[in-house]
Image (spheres, helix red, strand yellow):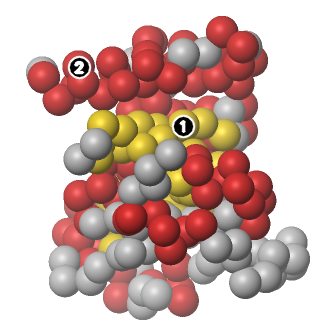
Amino acid sequence: MCIDKQFSSVLNPKEKLKEPSEAKGKALSDIFKLELVEDKDARDIQTIWEEYHKNKQVISATIPRDTYANLQDNMKLSPTFLFPLPRSQGYEFVMCQSYGNTVHFTPLLAYQVHKENAPECLTMVHYTELAEKGIILMRGEYDKNVLDSQEAQCLANQFQMYYSGKDATKLQLLQTFTKNPDTFKHMDLIAQLENISLS
């Protein structure tokens, strides 16, 4: 079997498994001065958030609170899922696992080798501190040895499309993967992605 060289660095296990107490959610105040946006509305905060991340090697987004409520419901119902990532030799499957407000993405190959010790290639954190203003801020940090910014954004976009519940076909695939894994077909995910690319 030929292993894509881009994934060679994730075939080693994590240094150490985090204890639940260490894996607590990250605070928005750790990366962002909340006092600067106290008197701002959602649109201004979105502009500031986008500007703040413009030259950083991360992905970011501003999600409406109602949309995030749907994402969160589906994250609880289907904490694990797969996404196809286009590669030069076809597709690489990347698994996502949701814990609280965080989503961890791991190449399926690395997960099959190391299970819960497999290192992430992308970690998305949803910050809910400004929910009263109607928005949730998302920041995703990715492993530059495994993904580029476009690939990280591709995974984030697919996550939102499947977990938002707005597309009945995608929601059905998500539910089938969770409730009836024996009937789930990986090729259906590729077909969905190719339909997006063509439209």
Residue under the point 50% across and 23% down: 186
Which residue lies under the disc numbered 1? 82
Residue toward you, 38 or 5: 5
Q: Looking at the picture, how far across and down is residue 122, in whole percent?
A: 48, 64
Amino acid residing under circle 1? Leu
> Is 118 drawn above or below residue 21 in the view shown?
above
Label 2 element class: helix
Q: Looking at the picture, how far across and down is residue 58, in whole percent?
A: 34, 74
Q: How packed is label 1: few (under 14 Cα within 10 Å), some, or many (20 or more)?
A: many
Q: Quadrant of residue 23?
A: bottom right
Compared across the picture, whether 75 is left or right of 154 comes to: right
Residue 61 in sight here: yes
Residue toward you, 2 or 162: 2
Label 1 element class: strand
Residue 69 in sight here: no
Residue under the point 61% across and 57% down: 110
Residue toward you, 170 or 193: 193
Q: How packed is label 2: few (under 14 Cα within 10 Å), some, or many (20 or more)?
A: few
* Disc on the earlier residue, 1 or 2: 1
Compared across the picture, whether 135 is left or right of 116 comes to: left
Q: Which mark is residue 49?
A: none
Q: Quadrant of residue 79?
A: top right
Q: Which mark is residue 195?
A: 2
> Is 184 drawn above or below residue 67 in the view shown?
above
Compared across the picture, whether 44 is left or right of 115 comes to: left
Looking at this view, name the residue that lies furthest to the front.
Answer: 1
